[in-house]
Image: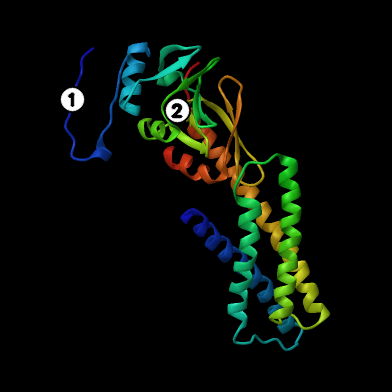
Amino acid sequence: MQVVFEKVESKEQEIALIKAVEKTSDIQSAIDLLENGINSISVTKDGITYMCKINAVYYIESVDKRTYIYTKNDCFETKSRLYELEEKLGTYFARCSKAMIVNLKKIRNVRSELGGRLNAEMLNGEKIVISRSYVKDIKRRMDL
Amino acid sequence: MIERIKTLFIQMLMISTGILFIISVEGVTYHLLGEEFSLDWYHPLSVLVAGFVCAIPTLLLMNYGEWSRKIFIIKLIIHMFLLYGIVVLMGYIFSWYTRWDGFLFVTIGYFLVYLFVWIASIWIGKQDEKKINKALEAIRDEE
């Protein structure tokens, strides 16, 4: 693949455009790296350590000071704290409650509820709640 | 903490505006009926004080936490009548009304404003829902 680099004057002008026939796993890794700064997180399950691809993460939850990473059909534990992951991960990983970060790319749709909160249905059918106080930040991340 | 103070301030301004609206309608109605209506020097300040007092239960009951729909509706009913009690009490203390018809104005006005605020917030929520769903379409991963 031909790679073109063009220097720009400011951070706001920075953009990466990938033109390809299909989105391969290599291209997805490159996207994750560009968007999130990292493309995988070290996780454990049943004592075995894995590297979980960022684009496989649906949401991350903190329960009793432990951090769990949820993918389409699985759940892993990570040593990183929620706030550390929040700092590392990119624009599309947004805080949706005090104890949860959601991957906006994995949301199928949202429904507004009384009290200003949103109910989000994930691509795997799971439902999560986006608290009222975090809706504004999510809108900002999506340039709304 | 700063977020809570900000919310308290916003709630105070919103509730004060609602109370001011009720008093304004009361004033206009009295004027149209040819009756006398005047405000004392402390009335504008009393509206702000009432707004602040009403903002406290609003902040405690309605803003933080995640609840089921049932709990939310119970909280909403408690909130509605608690605020009504505060508004009526403040109205009595600060003489926003001196006669029964004034009291009726405050009562009807309060419930109309309360209903309007909720209808408006549901409408805003639905608009947000549409905008967010449209934006999600553009970024959604293929599964």
Query: Which label number is shown at residue A5?
Result: 1
The quadrant in which residue A24 appears is top left
* Residue bearing mark 2: B139
- The residue depicted at 79 percent of the width and 75 percent of the height is B103
Chain letter of the residue beneath label 1 in the structure image: A
The one nearer the camera, A27 or B41, is: B41
Image location (x, y in percent) of residue B6: 49, 58
Query: Which label number is shown at residue A42?
Result: none
State the SS at label 2. helix
Image location (x, y in percent) of residue B101: 81, 78
CA distance separating discs 1 and 2: 24 Å
- Check disc 1: other Cα within 10 Å, few if <14, some if 14-19, many if 20+: few
The colour style of the image is rainbow
A24 to the left or right of A138: left
* Farthest bottom residue in view: B36
State the SS at label 1. loop
Chain letter of the residue beneath label 2 in the structure image: B
Q: Amino acid at mark 1?
A: Phe
Can residue B23 be seen at all in this image of the molecule?
Answer: yes
The quadrant in which residue B109 appears is bottom right
A6 to the left or right of B46: left
Q: Amino acid at mark 2?
A: Ile
Give a yes or no on whether discs 1 and 2 share a subunit: no
The one nearer the camera, B44 or B134, is: B44
Image location (x, y in percent) of residue A51: 39, 14
The one nearer the camera, A126 or A47, is: A47
- The residue depicted at 37 percent of the width and 31 percent of the height is A90
